[in-house]
Image (cartoon, coloured by chain):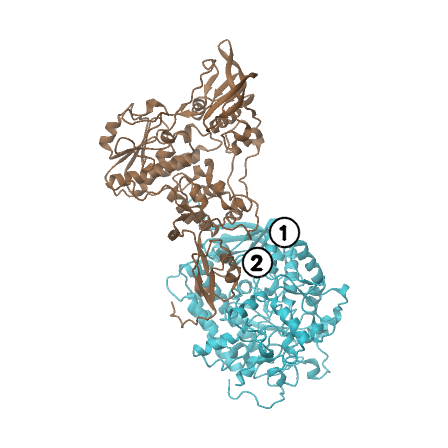
Amino acid sequence: MSIELVDRELCNGCGICVTACPLDVIRLDTLAADKGEYPSCRRACPAGVDMRSYLYLLRDGMIEEAMEVLRDALPLPAITGRVCPHPCESECSRNEVDEAVNINALERFVADRWLDEKAEPVPQVYAAKVAVVGSGPAGLACAYFLSRMGYPVTVFEARPVLGGMLRLGIPEYRLPRTVLDTQLGYIGRMGVEFKSGIAVGRDVTLEAVQKEYAAVFYAVGNQSSRRLEIDGVGLGGVSWGLDFLAGVNLKRVTGVKGRVVVIGGGNVAVDVALTALRLGAESVEMVCLESVGTMPAFKEEIDQAVEEGVRIYDGWGPKRILGAGGEAAGVELVRCTCVYDGRGRFRPTYDERLTKTIGADAVILAVGQTVDPASIPEKLKTTAGGTIQVDPVTLETTCPGVFAGGDVVSGPASVVEAVAAGRRASTSIDRCLKKQDLKGGRRLLPKRVKRPPKEGVESVARNAAPVLAAGQRAGNFKEVKLGFDEDTADLEVQRCMTCGSRAVISYVDDCMLCLYCEQDCPQTAIYVSPEKKVLPLMPWR
Amino acid sequence: MSGWDTERHIVTDVLVIGGGMAGLFAAIKARERGLDVTLTDKAYVGKAGSTHYAEGDVLFFRESRGHKLAEWLDIISKRCEYLNNREWDEVCLMEAEDRYNDLVSWGVQFYEKNGELYGWDTSAVGAPPSAYQDITMRARKYAPTLRRVALERGVRVLDNIMMVELLKQSGAVVGAVGFHVRGGRLFVIESKATVIATGAANFKSETYPTHFWTGDGEAMAYRAGAEITGKEFAGGVTYSRREIEQRQRAGRREEFSGEIIESSYSHPFALGGGFSGWYTRPTLNAEGGPVIMPAWEAHCGRAPLYFDTEEIPPKKWEWLREYFKRIEVAWAQADKIGLDVFRGGKIRWPSSRVAPGSLFAGTGIWPVDTHCATGLPGLYAAGNACATRGSGAMYAGMGFAMNHAMVTGARAGSAAGEYASRAAKVVADAAELQRAKSLVRAPLERTGGFGPAWVTQIVQSITVPYFYLGVKHGDRLRAAISIAEFVNRHLVPRLMAADPHEWRLAHETRNMALGAEMRLKASLFRTESRGDHFREDYPRREDPTWLVWVKLRDEEGGMKLYTEPVPEEWWPDLTKSYEEKYPAMLPMEERESSSGGADDVH
């Protein structure tokens, strides 16, 4: 007897046979490329990371191969492994059993182990040069993927420092600058050229760039804070969220005094609040229209703010900023009754009868970001919202050969969405330069695999990433969320249900007729032949 | 590849190698002492180790149920032909209930009937009511439960890691080096104490599904200087019908020429007719495992054989049917090949127990005390890798090995934990680490040599055929030894592997080749027959000359064999007749029908 068949149609990739086999007969094909389906995690990921494959490789200790899978989809895995909102986890089938696999922490676990790796220069195989405008995540991604293909790429950055919002917006306690610098260094070593301090449109025209470069990717992000026209915004001590964060991150702002009130309920607002706390604010209070449960910021960020002592006035909007002697002295709040209208549009309504005044020495407004109109060349058409108009599939702008993506197209979004846009643009640019059809075969989203049944899957608690104790965070910018150790990673990676992969007979020489695979398979997909195969005497090697 | 260690380095208090019943017990018990515990297995802990042998039967001794220790010990001594270590037997029996209570508290389920624990009760076949009793766990369920318990308690469980070489420093064992059998990552585990619970040692013979039992733990302990014993006892020589058919088809007629029905569990067959009725005395040790008689009958050209069970009364038939169905995997196998196990009053059983197995609780690493210490500081052995000699010269009976695995596992875990708590931290130096690592890596790094599959076939060819380790003869043993020595000296040092899969096979082959030499040499050394060690050229038990244990160890690269006497108070009464001392009959002893022995067969 030996195993003869695993039915690819019946098999649901649960992997029970792989563990049931006391030897090494069956392994999982996590690519299952013939199926043309994605597991729900991968499908939810804007960047399309193949979690199923890299987690399975990690399970077998093949971290080098796991890293290759990450590299295929992510230019900055150590960064997304820290700051990604991980939509993959929300879709994880494990949610049906107990809780999602901690994919984000595992991504970081793999990426961190390669942090110090020095990239080998990628040989350039094409003569056509590509310019990328903006060194934020979208621009970096586009440069990374094009460089991997063999294109010479130059990244123009208006600021003197690289990284865009990764450096200016994300606080250091969420993304240590050493991590950012090494990830940038990796891309640099691949052969991407960086030119900082050059703003396209100001220092050099887009036309001039186009003369030298065969294609341009425009990814300048959202650099302006959305303005709030209320009384008192001109007072001293009033600042805007992004300006504040950029000031701190460029070490121009080194301290905050007194009581700080942050207006806004998004991630930037939380970042501002926690940054102000670290810079010595006496107290930090947040004001947001939404209730705590519906704030746009990620739940874990809000939890962290509360844990560190930030007070949140939820359900309130700012009516005006009160001043004394030209300096901010407080904020008058008004009760917000509803944030969105019946069609889900942002249209807050207030109950003017309910007001409240809180004292403040500094007020920081973080109510959203917008495109800086000055950063967009005239020849690129924009939408009513001020973002660049592009084809959703190819990201080509109204100007042939010029592509755009990231926040400058989508409005404020996550790092991984920017990465996805950069990658999408790199594919378009490659096709464009090869004079191929830009759109052909680019499906927006593949099918999702059938969710595996939760029955029979033993409940195993999710391992949370460790965090720096709240008491150790005051007054410093030490990283708050810490990485898994190997033991925890080992445990967590086993929770992956490898949805939709397929078991394949890999080493039939190991089959010893125990029948465990056939007996344990919940899908009756395995057939072990009753006829024993007697192998001929083998050659010596 | 900077930033990532291609090897994983773990520092732990107690390392347990092997994740079956014994290993899991050891890990959990050591962890209960608050120590850092690492458990490795070359397959998946919770599935590995639950073999066809470990189908769930557990010997269950309870004084509260009127079981009498002296009576049980005497039964064991007689069955095991006086080579059993009664001290260990007593320990295992007396702690059976504690271990049962552990399992129940962890959530392991046992079969029950009418509110009573349910298992093989020898009174069903007319044995004294107070004699052996065993109970049965839900097969394939207990191991996952124990995995969960180990994880919940914080044992570091590492699946798919094959440990290959022990680390030694200043005479003590301070860890082991191995690798991931799929990913190929090297694992260096430094430990204060190490427990080997890697099970028995077999040769991947075709029809017996324990190909992972390649004696890995025994081999690494031997190389580190531990004593090994019990290698001359076969632990079962029976053959499956399927195997014989297939072999005929493959043209290998020299081995068998007919159908031999195997006796995996011998209780019912002890009463049976068929060939066993040809002898004046029982040919099968009443409770003992399979013995060499079927091989002998075939050797004499009298196959096909079967076990005629027509004499079993209908009531017991019903009981047997129920009983056999609990042996889930074997039952499924029978079903699979369309075999009606109970056809025509004859029991046919497809899950063969093919020679040469290991004598459970009899073969393996010699423990120097009843706490599983091996004589090497820091090294402990448990389960079938630990030769407590609880089984002496013949497997003592149903549920014995599982009971033994639990008790030795718990004891080894506790003792290793105790040792680790007070041991000064000894760390392997750079030279030792380098030695062990390069030894582990060697097959991958060789660019010329032999593939493990080919060498395995050669090892099997001098072990699996019944006429080497089943029906033995000095001439054949010497011939096989010369091949085994050649294999170990010439082929094993040139084993090569192309990938992690073959890497594991290469080390398994290396261990099996060593095991073959041990078995053949121990078999040649014991110039008598006893239990399931049968020598055509020395066909009788020789008292008191061979009331000794044969031990072997590595001495300057050579295999040294020597004996250790069984304490006199455990000897049989030498004034009794041979038949009284040894009610079970060996081949070549008198037969009712005088069709004679084998002619010119050696």
Placement of B270 over or under A31, stated as above or below: below
Tell me residue A359's x, y (percent).
Answer: 56, 16
Placement of B136 over or under B151, stated as above or below: below
Instruction: Say whether residue A188 is visible.
Output: no
Residue depth check, mark 2 versus mark 1: number of the one nearer the observer = 2
The answer to which quarter of the image holds residue B302 is bottom right
Q: Amino acid at mark 1?
A: Arg
* Label pair 2/1, CB-CB below 8 angstroms: no
Q: Nearer the viewer, residue B313 or B452?
A: B313
Q: Amino acid at mark 2?
A: Gly
Write down the colour of chain B.
cyan
Please name the residue that numbered disc 1 is placed on: B31
Please name the residue that numbered disc 2 is placed on: B19
Would residue A119 appear left or right of A130 to someone viewing this image?
A: right
Q: Nearer the viewer, residue A228 or B157?
A: A228
Would residue B377 appear left or right of A65 to someone viewing this image?
A: right
Query: The residue marked by circle 1 belongs to what chain?
Result: B
